[in-house]
Image (cartoon, rainbow, N blue to C red):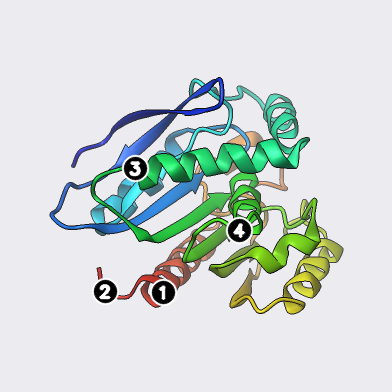
């Protein structure tokens, strides 16, 4: 498997993503993965490797530059907020990752997806709202607040939101607003709530934060991964 650091740029910012590709012949669907607010780390890299083993070309994207990672939750929130504060810059940072993935020789540029975790889930949705050429978008325990909700009409992809039903960081009002926003579009979308799951339910290291709002849930992790693969089959067809 040809796994490597992939450098790409967003304007003057050098970004260091992680490309996972098993180098099998033929053009294959490409998936860009946006990480949690802590930045590109083992969780998103492991998911990229898992997708590559299934025949996708996967790029774990760098949201901050130089592969920067936060060392604690306050630092992660500060870094995330800096990117989110300018929606045009946020979208451009996500598009830079999609462009870097699309430029890889093994990628079928007509079959692209964006997925993300927590802040990364919000980023995948925001990339979709920009009108990016995507077949599928999947958010895992991501924030659902939209800076420009009217841009939901620009989404060209099938959308799957995997949400922890007990997530205290995503209030019911935010979920309801997202659903109302999507109902006003022609987008093929679904939102699945996993009972008993809170924030970061796909990350086995979530419990290390020592905050009950963050916890791994093996059942929700397994089910949401399967739901994503089912959506990919619909969106991409045979690999």
Q: Are marks 1 and 4 in contact (CB under 8 Å)?
A: no
Q: CA distance from mark 3 to mark 4?
A: 19 Å
Tag 2: Cα neighbours inside 10 Å, few (<14), some, or many (≥20)? few
Rendered view: 9 above or below 92 = above
Q: Percent position (x, y) of residue 111? A: 37, 63
Closest to the observer, 80 or 73: 80
Q: CA distance from mark 1 to mark 3?
A: 26 Å
Kindly indicate the quadrant of the structure image that contains residue 12. Answer: top right
Tag 4: Cα neighbours inside 10 Å, few (<14), some, or many (≥20)? some
Q: CA distance from mark 2 to mark 3?
A: 22 Å
Picture disc at residue 206: none
Q: Which residue is mark 3?
A: 103
Q: CA distance from mark 1 to mark 4?
A: 23 Å
Residue 165 visible in the shown view: no
Q: CA distance from mark 2 to mark 4?
A: 25 Å
Q: Which residue is mark 2?
A: 238
Disc nearest the viewer among 2 and 1: 2
Q: Percent position (x, y) of residue 200? A: 60, 49
User: Could you tell me how many numbered marks the image carries?
Assistant: 4
Q: Which residue is mark 4?
A: 131
Picture disc at residue 230: 1
**Could you tell me which secondary element the residue under label 3 belongs to?**
loop
Which of the marked residues, 2 or 1, is nearer the chain's N terminus? 1
Q: Is residue 175 left or right of residue 96?
A: right
Tag 1: Cα neighbours inside 10 Å, few (<14), some, or many (≥20)? few
**Could you tell me which secondary element the residue under label 4 belongs to?**
loop
Disc nearest the viewer among 2 and 3: 3
Q: Percent position (x, y) of residue 198? A: 67, 56
Q: Percent position (x, y) of residue 100? A: 41, 39
């Amino acid at each position: 498997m040809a796994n490597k650091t992939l450098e790409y740029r967003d304007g003057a910012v050098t970004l260091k993503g992680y490309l996972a590709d098993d180098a099998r012949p033929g053009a294959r669907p490409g998936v860009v993965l946006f990480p949690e607010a802590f930045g590109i780390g083992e969780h998103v890299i492991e998911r990229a490797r898992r997708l590559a083993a299934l025949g996708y070309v996967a790029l774990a994207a760098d949201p901050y530059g130089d592969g920067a990672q936060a060392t604690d939750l306050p630092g992660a929130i500060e870094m995330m907020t800096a990117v989110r504060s300018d929606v045009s810059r946020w979208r451009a940072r996500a598009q830079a990752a999609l462009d870097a993935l699309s430029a890889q020789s093994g990628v079928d540029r007509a079959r692209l997806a964006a997925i993300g975790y927590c802040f990364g889930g919000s980023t995948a949705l925001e990339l979709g709202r920009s009108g990016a050429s995507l077949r599928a978008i999947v958010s895992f325990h991501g924030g659902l607040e939209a800076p420009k909700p009217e841009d939901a009409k620009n989404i060209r992809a099938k959308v799957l939101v995997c949400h922890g039903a007990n997530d205290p960081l995503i209030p019911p009002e935010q979920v309801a607003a997202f659903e109302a926003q999507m109902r006003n579009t022609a987008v093929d979308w679904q939102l699945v709530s996993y009972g008993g799951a809170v924030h970061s339910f796909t990350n086995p290291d979530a419990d290390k934060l020592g905050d009950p709002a963050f916890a791994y849930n093996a059942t929700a992790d397994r089910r949401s991964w399967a739901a994503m693969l089912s959506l990919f089959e619909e969106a991409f067809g045979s690999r």
